[in-house]
Image (cartoon, helix red, strand yellow):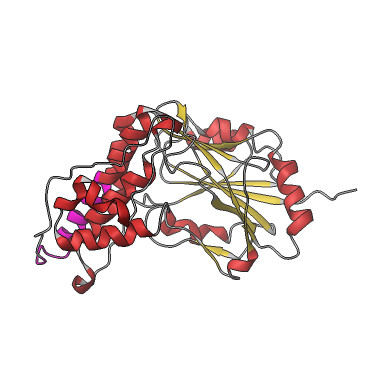
Amino acid sequence: MRQDIAISLIVHTRNSAATLPRLLETTGWATERIVIDMQSSDATVEIARAADCRVLSCAIVDAVDDIRNQYLAEARHDWVLVLDSDEYLADDAYEAMRQLVDDHGDKIDAFALPRWNSVAGQIMRGSGFYPDQQIRFFRRGTVAWQPGNHRVPQVLTGARRLRVLQPPNCVHIHHENYADIVSFITRQLRYALTDSYDPDPGHFDFSLYIAEAYAEFARRHEPNEDGDLSTAVATVLAWDRIMRGLIHWERLGRQQPLNAAFSLPIVPILPAPGKRPRVPDSGDWQRTSFRHLPREIGRRLRRFFQRGRR
């Protein structure tokens, strides 16, 4: 007979009263639940305490990734699950995670769980939002987050000790990301403004941000999977790269030239009827309107596109 495993759940909150109850309803099996609250002014703390969570208070920070490591040591058990306050799990999640530990716990320290993401009320089937594996279930002391927003955490015991779960037949995280496109734009701008940027002026190249914008649109644009919402999301995330480039330039003192700056015309390779959109390759170059771009941007784009869909 399989043994139960003790799991410590850690959740960071900030005015999460609207979403926290669903998370707590789906994680009642956790041996301990720790809520790290950033000075919430709504009922978040009261909701957490009523559910017998251990509540710790911390200062408000722009990027929660920067402080996750400070609170991982609060977990009392060998296995730790980290969720955001707007995430939740399916009813069979505990059984699935117990099976993971039984099957792989002797040789694996961390599991990357697929995540369903919802934008404007629609579950995204593609557009870079799925399977979106997240390193969230791990042995205590084996994972550390990196500074910044949405950086992939490190598995301290090495990549071989990480198992990336492949859908569909595995435990998933469910994430209600953005209520609407305005919320999506607002949060992307906040992420860009609060992120960390390379302080070395010699590493800055605005043409790289432009090339990344094209590559991001091509990677995200999957209207056959997600309809017009895919186009909206891809456009926002392409412009996100441009905004990050300008923020980076500003923080470095506006000394580097922006001779590659221009109004970004996103032009994807349109698919044949019934076919999926694809990332252009180097052979497509002269057949697209990308050929008008400055030479350095073209060089960087070829480098991105020759790698295929990332």
Measured as percent of width and height from the top left, residue 150 is found at 41, 52
Q: Is residue 267 above or below residue 156?
A: above
- Nearer to the camera, 175 or 40: 175
Q: Is residue 188 above or below residue 231?
A: below
Measured as percent of width and height from the top left, residue 136 is found at 57, 52
Q: Is residue 204 above or below residue 25?
A: below
Measured as percent of width and height from the top left, residue 249 is found at 16, 60
Residue 72, quarter of the rendered image: bottom right
Residue occupying the far top of the picture: 121
In the rendered image, residue 105 lying in the magenta stretch gets the answer no
Left or right of 158: which side holds 123?
left
Q: Which residues are magenta?
A: 239-256
Location of the C terminus by quadrant is: bottom left
Q: Image point 29% across, 37% down: which residue?
A: 185
Q: Image point 75% across, 42% down: which residue?
A: 95
Dominant secondary structure (helix, strand or loop) of the stretch shown in magenta: helix
Residue 78, quarter of the rendered image: bottom right
Left or right of 152: which side holds 281?
left
